[in-house]
Amino acid sequence: MNIWFHPAKEFDNMLRNAASKIQLENFDPQMRTADPRFGDFQSNGVLPMAKMQKTNPRALAQTLVDELKKDENFDESLVEVSIAGPGFINFALTKKFLNAWLAKYKGEAELKNASKKFYNGKKVVIDYPSPNTAKQMHVGHLRPMVIGEAVKRLLKFCGADIKTDNHIGDWGTNFGILIYGIKTQNYKLDPNNENSLEELEQMYKRGSALTKENPEAADAARAELVKLQNGDAENVELWNEINKVSTVAFERMYKRMGLTIDMTLGESYYRDKVGRIYQELSEIGLAEENQGALVVFHKEHERFAKQPFIIRKSDGASNYASTDLATILNRVENLDAEEVVYVTDGRQQDHFQQLFITVEKWFKAKAYKLPQMRHVWFGTILGEDGKAIKTKSGEPIRLKALLDEAVARAKALVKEKNPDVSEDDANKIAETIGVAAIRYSDLAQNRTGDYVFSWDKLLAFDGNTAPYLLYAAARIHSIFRKIGTSPDCNFPEASELETEQEIALARKLIALPSVFELTLSELRPHFLCTYLYELAGIFSTFYNANKVIVDDEGTKQRRLMLCARTLRVLEAGLRLLGIEPLEKM
Ligand code: ARG
């Protein structure tokens, strides 16, 4: 018996095979999740096909189904196929299948092993959180961290051979001003000083104001930059120290946010690698000189025919675009990337569109292997006033302050719910809930939209929130604690699913691979969030309606199995989102 992990995909394949056997060209099954009254999945592809072929859709559906039933992978004991309405094909998984699937895909290891097929070892490089050095992490750094990490974990779970390349902004004109400020104010950089990034930021602000008022200061700052670019030992040393101070502070935050970064090749890494870019792009006629700058126009494109992609500035300096061109070349040539994923905010959409079109033309001309390129962009976090979130004095909110506040609020809630909790436990649980709440409220939004930040909503114990999901998982743990068994044990005597609630829950669990497929298709983690939230709700309905600890062993075991599987799916899902579940809350 072949227990398909991802039945919708199997039926899709079987339908395609059946279509080609009956000489139906280009048939797209258009598999959907079905209305639960009719089954689990529905193929809607016959109608448009019949229309094109000017045949009767029901008859065509029947021919297809007859052919499909001849498929060697088809098994009548696992799925019932029927034709409905004008020619929809419905697939209803049998109870036998549901039981067997639940018995087989026990926990995270089994789910991961089966999910590997999605990416099949494909080499992926993902670019996040990629902050700029010499600046503190503020609320604007939240989204690239949490979205990037969730996307990375999901791709990895689904079989990608993935590496994070943290493309930090560590090179540019601001370093002239910074070095000028450090020298004139006799500032001592110290990676152990928690405030050093803040001080550097102030220094930059003062320096930048000064260079605007005073032409001599501006010249001096520019001279420091030129010295840095020419490899002056003292300035290179200062630049190294600035980056060191930034990295130490960033790493503290990555750790708190559970980020797994494999390498950091910042913009500076490419400063001696842009020459090849200018040369190749000019050589193939893609780049042209324009008012002293080197630019790329895309004549076929509505906007980019006029809006140039500037790859070398008129002063001869490289920029964000040249660096990104050198970066993708490195990722393909040295990291063998077959797919590159960039996680940044939506204001960079033009940059990445121009980058991708340029790379396509350039790689084609040079016969380089073209990777798949995806820009995973996101909107802005808004304050309750509907504008980008800021402190009262109009500064960006520091990320650390935001997280600390979340943890403090979570601690108050934990103590309120559980007055006997020890101080130590309260602190640990609060750190998890606080950070998870901020993270989840971000991931649960469709990433391309803006959203309003609300303490009350994100910390609520009901609704689509981290506290709700963490609590749902902890509650299932307590069921097993109470009866003294492990959720990982086998349930050999589990009888066939019976009640409406049991079946609804089983079907939801089995929908997990379809949710992975959907989430992967556009790299939008909110699809996974919605699923986990719905799963927790369906579990709750089941648990309220069906007593688990009953005398009949078969009933008890099958219900415990449903509890255990729900727990492991919830936990696996939370981990994919970057949230470490709790056993007790
Ligand atoms: N440092 C940039 C920023 O803060 C993001 C870099 C994204 N990655 C890239 N390869 N362009 O906006």
Image (cartoon, rainbow, N blue to C red):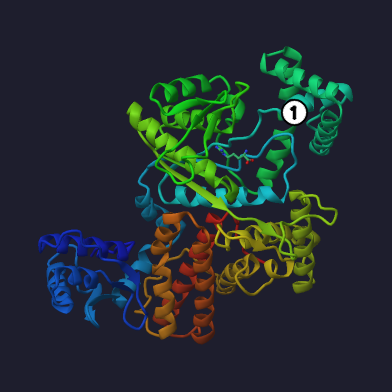
Identified at 61% across, 45% down, the residue is 259
Where in the figure is residue 17, as x and y percent of width and height?
17, 60
Determine whether, in the image, residue 254 is placed left or right of residue 288.
right
Where in the figure is residue 375, as x and y percent of width and height?
50, 46
Determine whether, in the image, residue 471 is placed left or right of residue 393.
left
Q: Amino acid at mark 1?
A: Ile
Rendered position, 569 above or below 191: below
Ligand 1 found in image quarter: top right
Where in the figure is residue 117, as x and y percent of width and height?
34, 51
Rendered position, 451 above or below 43: above
Q: Residue furthest left?
A: 22
Closest to the observer, 452 or 76:
452
Determine whether, in the image, residue 418 is placed left or right of residue 542.
right
Q: Residue furthest right?
A: 185
Q: Secondary structure at mark 1?
A: helix
Note whether residue 106 is visible.
yes
Determine whether, in the image, residue 183 is placed left or right of residue 229.
right
Identified at 22% across, 78% down, the residue is 87
Identified at 58% across, 53% down, the residue is 378
The residue where tag 1 is placed is 242
Quarter of the figure with the C terminus: bottom right
Closest to the observer, 245 or 408:
245
Quarter of the figure with the N terminus: bottom left
Residue 476 lies in quadrant: bottom right
Closest to the observer, 375 or 238:
375
Identified at 41% across, 82% down, the residue is 555
Where in the figure is residue 352, as x and y percent of width and height?
51, 42
Rendered position, 110 above or below 535: above
